[in-house]
Amino acid sequence: MNPQAKLIFTISLVLGTAITTSSNHWIMAWAGLEINTLAILPLISKSHHPRAIEAATKYFLVQATASTLLLFSSMTNAWYTGQWDITQLTHPISCLILTSAIAMKLGLVPFHFWFPEVLQGAPLTTGLLLATVMKFPPITLFFLTSHSLNPTLLTCMAILSAALGGWMGLNQTQIRKILAFSSIAHLGWMTIIISFDPKLTLLNFYIYSLMTAATFLALNSIKALKLTTLMTTWTKTPSLNAMLFLTLLSLAGLPPLTGFLPKWLIIQELTKQSMAPAATVISLLSLLGLFFYLRLAYCTTITLPPHTTNHMKQWHTNKPTHITIAILTTLSTMLLPISPLIYPLS
């Protein structure tokens, strides 16, 4: 892709995200979401492969539908209450339509079907944007309207997302699809707590973005798209694979690593809110996700391909992205000890 075009699309992405996250008026928030959608479409379809074109078309149709619903929700609320302010969403029908619109934007169950297909058709770097940056504006709108939304509906959607994200990721062999279902499961954890402690949702999103960025950049560096490819990478970059192994375990939420922090805080808060059954169910459902993370980690480090040829191992590389990967993997694995400092900052 032309560097100037890529620069324009990147600036548009930043601009759209900034407009949505900083606006108080529904029309401005909608305009920011539209700018974001139009900026990411060329990045999804830049390879001109039929699968990439299909992914871009699906993404456009779903996001256009979600934006229409969001605009309709805000207009209905303005019709009944005379308020265009995002925080003044009070009409129950508007709240229900907005919940559907944001669930569609994020890829929450039952509006999750587009996300694995789009991520599979996009390049790894664009997939990283779709899984992190593109979810930030809808999460912000969720945060601003969390006091108006129905907690029971959000809890049901969250548990279904954690269940389907874990269950449907079990038999996948394509890494991008596994990461898409992982994203759906993580969104379940973010959604279940948003009515009770919205700041905890944002903390979960920030930590998830850190870990996902580390995973996507590491996979992009070793050019792995399938589990079979991942099995042969240990002989090329052992140090990078070892860090990828730890990052995947952190994404699974195992205790000594950073990924355990949001899960721990969410379970604690749910218990305080007398929602111990929901906390138990979503904790058990996270074991499904743990299985496919362990399978990815197993393929990354423990499996060795037969008849490996002898060659020099790349213990050190001079790629500039590897510095970013090093910083992200360190943050993805070692933030748990300073959790008393992180939680008040959020």
Image (cartoon, rainbow, N blue to C red):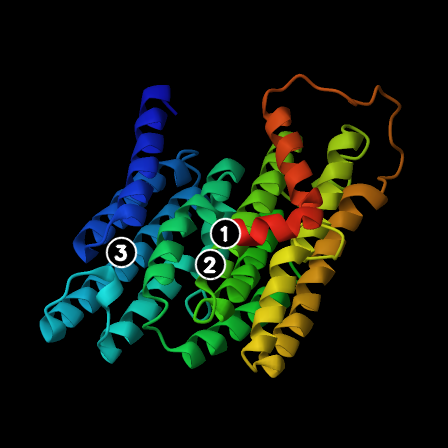
Neighbour tally class for label 1: few under 14, some 14-19, many 20 plus, Cα within 10 Å: few
The numbered mark at residue 181 is none
Q: Amino acid at mark 1?
A: Ser
Q: Is residue 263 left or right of residue 80?
A: right
Q: Give the percent coordinates (x, y) of residue 177.
A: 57, 53
Q: Residue furthest top?
A: 318
Q: Earlier in the sequence, mark 2 or mark 1?
A: 2
What distance separates the C-alpha of mark 3 from that of mark 2? 28 Å
Q: Which residue is mark 1?
A: 346
Q: Amino acid at mark 3?
A: Ala
Q: Earlier in the sequence, mark 3 or mark 1?
A: 3
Determine contact: label 3, label 1, CB under 8 Å.
Answer: no
- Of badges 3 and 1, the one in the foreground is 1
Q: Which residue is mark 2?
A: 199
Q: Is residue 45 above or below residue 144?
A: above
Q: Amino acid at mark 2?
A: Lys
Q: Is residue 279 left or right of residue 254?
A: left
Q: Is residue 330 above or below residue 250?
A: above
Quick one: SS at disc 2? helix
Q: Which residue is mark 3?
A: 64
